């Protein structure tokens, strides 16, 4: 079944009372990444459900991270300095 880009959603769900996060996805790229993690780390990542278009995974909620954005201007300056040296 072909899904539109809009329908290829990913939802991460967790709460303060539990140590486990649940990830529901219909995005094939996310499924491939999580399937690799399930195969490589079966004690940590678990496939908990699937159907013809989606999969659900569980893993420790401490693995969900929030990052500040990278500083694009700083990266460009470093790249320019490297290019000037060569």
Image (cartoon, rainbow, N blue to C red):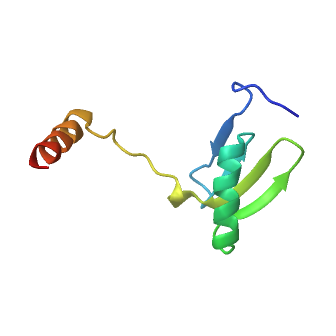
At 72% across and 44% down in the image, what residue appears?
Answer: 28
Q: Is residue 18 left or right of residue 81?
A: right
Question: Nearest the camera: 69 or 61?
Answer: 69
Query: What is the x, y in percent for residue 41?
Result: 63, 72
Query: What is the x, y in percent for residue 23?
Result: 68, 49
Task: Please identify the quarter of the rendering in which residue 27 is found.
Answer: top right
| Residue 85 visible (yes or no) | yes
Q: Is residue 43 left or right of residue 49?
A: left
At 67% across and 39% down in the image, what residue appears?
Answer: 10
| Residue 41 visible (yes or no) | no
Query: What is the x, y in percent for residue 75?
Result: 23, 41
Question: Nearest the camera: 55 or 60?
Answer: 55
At 11% across and 43% down in the image, what residue appears?
Answer: 84
Query: What is the x, y in percent for residue 57?
Result: 72, 55
Report the residue that reaches farthest toward the bottom.
Answer: 43
Question: Nearest the camera: 2 or 16?
Answer: 2
At 60% across and 49% down in the image, what residue appears?
Answer: 15
Q: Is residue 35 above or below residue 76?
A: below
Looking at the rendered structure, the number of numbered marks drawn on it comes to 0
Quarter containing the N terminus: top right
Task: Please identify the quarter of the rendering in which residue 39 is found.
Answer: bottom right
Question: Nearest the camera: 85 or 32?
Answer: 85
Q: Is residue 79 above or below residue 43?
A: above
């Amino acid at each position: 079944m072909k899904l539109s880009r809009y329908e290829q959603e990913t939802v991460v769900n967790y709460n303060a009372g539990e140590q486990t996060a649940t990830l529901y996805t219909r995005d094939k790229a996310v499924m491939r990444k999580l399937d690799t993690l399930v195969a490589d780390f079966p004690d940590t990542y678990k496939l908990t459900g699937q159907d013809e278009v989606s999969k659900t995974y569980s893993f420790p909620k401490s693995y969900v991270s929030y990052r500040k954005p990278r500083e694009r201007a700083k990266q460009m300056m470093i790249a320019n300095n490297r290019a000037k040296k060569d």
